[in-house]
Image (tube, grey):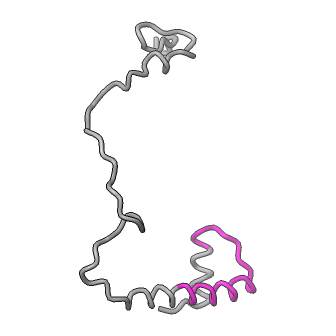
Amino acid sequence: MSVDIATVKRVARLARIAVTEEDAQRMTGELNGILGFVEQLSEVNVDGIEPMTSVTPMAMKKRTDVVTDGNKADDIVANAPNEDRNFFLVPKVVE
């Protein structure tokens, strides 16, 4: 895949980035270099290789999925101007 100046300008316009003609020329070369590197990566044979989450093997820390209130209700309403039984009290706004 190759990027031309028109594509760079279109992407810049869509991203709302102001690009001068000189910047567009420079970015065209840089983007083509990046895309060339990505194409090289697609040529690597990865058959039979497991996906990794880290470069060193490690077990992921897991916890049980339990619904709790977090035992933080008192901390949450601690700075509230008005509260009642861990609920925020707000002034009535609808008649």
Q: For the point 26% across and 84% down, which residue is it?
A: 47
What is the total number of numbered labels drawn onto the structure image?
Answer: 0
Residue 70: % across, % down: 37, 26
Q: For the point 27% across and 31% down, which residue is it?
A: 67
Residue 75: % across, % down: 49, 19
Residue sitting nearer the eye, 65 or 32? 65
Residue sitting nearer the eye, 69 or 9? 69
Determine whether, in the image, residue 2 is placed left or right of residue 66.
right
Residue that lies at the very extreme toward the front in this rendered image: 57
Residue 29: say if magenta.
yes
Residue 24: % across, % down: 68, 84
Does residue 25 sit above or below 82 in this rendering?
below
Residue sitting nearer the eye, 9 or 52? 52
Q: Which residues are magenta?
A: 13-34
Residue 80: say if magenta.
no
**Main SS class of the magenta portion in the image:** helix
Residue that lies at the very extreme toward the top in this rendered image: 84
Determine whether, in the image, residue 47 is placed left or right of residue 73.
left
Determine whether, in the image, residue 77 is placed left or right of residue 66.
right
Residue sitting nearer the eye, 10 or 45? 45
State the image quarter where residue 46 is shown: bottom left
Does residue 74 sit above or below 5 in this rendering?
above
Q: For the point 57% across and 16% down, which residue is it?
A: 79
Q: For the point 70% across and 72% down, which residue is it?
A: 18
State the image quarter where residue 64 is shown: top left
Does residue 24 sit above or below 94 in this rendering?
below
Residue 84: % across, % down: 44, 7
